[in-house]
Image: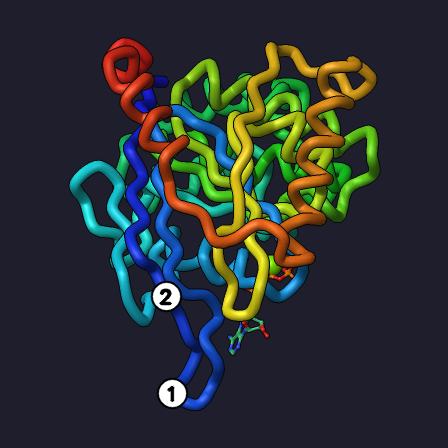
Amino acid sequence: MSIRGVNIHIDQLKHRYSAKSPLTFDGVSLQSPPGEVLAIIGRSGCGKSTLLHILAGLLQASGGTVRLDEEVVQKPSPHWVMMFQAPHLYPWMKVAQNVGTGLRFAGWKEARIRERVEEAIRLVDLEAHADNNVQDLSGGQQQRVALARSLVMEPELLLLDEPFSALDAFTRSALQRDVRSIAKRLGFNVVIVTHDIDEAVIMADRAVIMAGSPGRIMTELEVDLPDPRERHDPAVQAMRTRLMDAFQDAAQGKSGPKGNEAAQEAIAANEPQAAGQHG
Ligand SMILES: Nc1ncnc2c1ncn2[C@@H]1O[C@H](COP(=O)(O)OP(=O)(O)OP(=O)(O)O)[C@@H](O)[C@H]1O
Ligand SMILES: [Mg+2]
């Protein structure tokens, strides 16, 4: 499977749900280089899901733009796929059939579908369950099916809206680790919305913190930790504390809305390697 990442450019994005409702967020500018795993953290109601829906092309912003490389996001596409908290599988289909639905819609030949589906099922460690009915799987396994169904489309960008919050702690941490390692291996971008600081530390290359009403990006932090990341590692714990402090400062209004200097630097630093990451 060959997947490439994208440069994400979010420029002065704002949103309100109707003419009478208040601004959900305003002046959100953000960039993310190819292959980055970016976490968006913030209290309930600051507009994280709204932002993600706009990134997925499921919702039109009231102002500003989202570009993936040069393409303006205006509608859903198999290149940028979203995974939700509930896996939304077809309960009457087996695992492999669920994973192949997108390719079937796209008119692929059965032999190619079978090959690609096998590969995606292998990536998420579900080989033993390929021919099972999805309703016979655990919640974590069903979320892995949803992940495989996203991966067969070779997305440039995977958008995750608290996708593991309904799972038990053990299953959740296995999925966090696996999604990060698959993304790093294949090279696509991930944007994950969460209010779980640990999740951001385990999964992300960089975390941005949203707060306020209307929501704004208050601060950001590089999560420069080596892989694999273990929760009890002192460096991971120290990063957790830094992120928690930044989160609290943002919530108390101690940090103002931020420019995007660190992201610009990250993009400049990543651009030469990006071409080599593909595939
Ligand atoms: N469809 C909608 N119509 C009108 N207002 C909405 C709609 N969806 C969300 N909102 C409002 O927009 C604001 C931001 O909601 P959003 O769901 O983006 O927040 P969030 O940061 O994802 O919160 P949570 O952490 O609880 O998921 C909230 O005040 C919410 O009530
Ligand atoms: Mg939400």
Q: Residue at x 39, y 24 (%)?
A: 35
Amino acid residing under circle 1: Ala
Residue underneath mark 1: 19
Rendered location of residue 145, percent (x, y): 59, 35
Q: Image height check: is 215 above or below 52?
A: below
In the picture, the quarter occupied by the N terminus is top left
In the image, 173 versus 118, the foreground residue is 173
| Residue beneath disc 2 | 14
Q: Residue 99 location in percent, x, y?
A: 49, 36
Q: In this view, does 199 lie to the left or right of 148?
A: right
Using a 10 Å C-alpha cutoff, classify the residue at mark 1 as few (fewer than 14 neighbours), some (14 to 19) or many (20 or more).
few
* Residue 279 in sight: no
Could you tell me the amino acid type at mark 2? Lys
Furthest toward the bottom, the residue is 20
Q: In which quarter of the view is residue 179 placed?
A: top right
Residue 129 is drawn in which quadrant?
Answer: top right
Q: In which quarter of the image is the C terminus?
A: top left
Q: Residue at x 34, y 57 (%)?
A: 57
Q: In this view, does 9 lie to the left or right of 144?
A: left
Q: How far apart are marks 1 and 2 (CA)?
A: 13 Å
Picture quadrant of ligand 2:
bottom right
Count of labels in the image: 2
For marks 1 and 2 on the same chain, the one whose residue lies earlier in the sequence: 2
**Observer-nearest of 97 and 40:** 40
Q: In this view, does 203 lie above or below 245?
A: above
* Residue at image coords 54%, 56%: 48
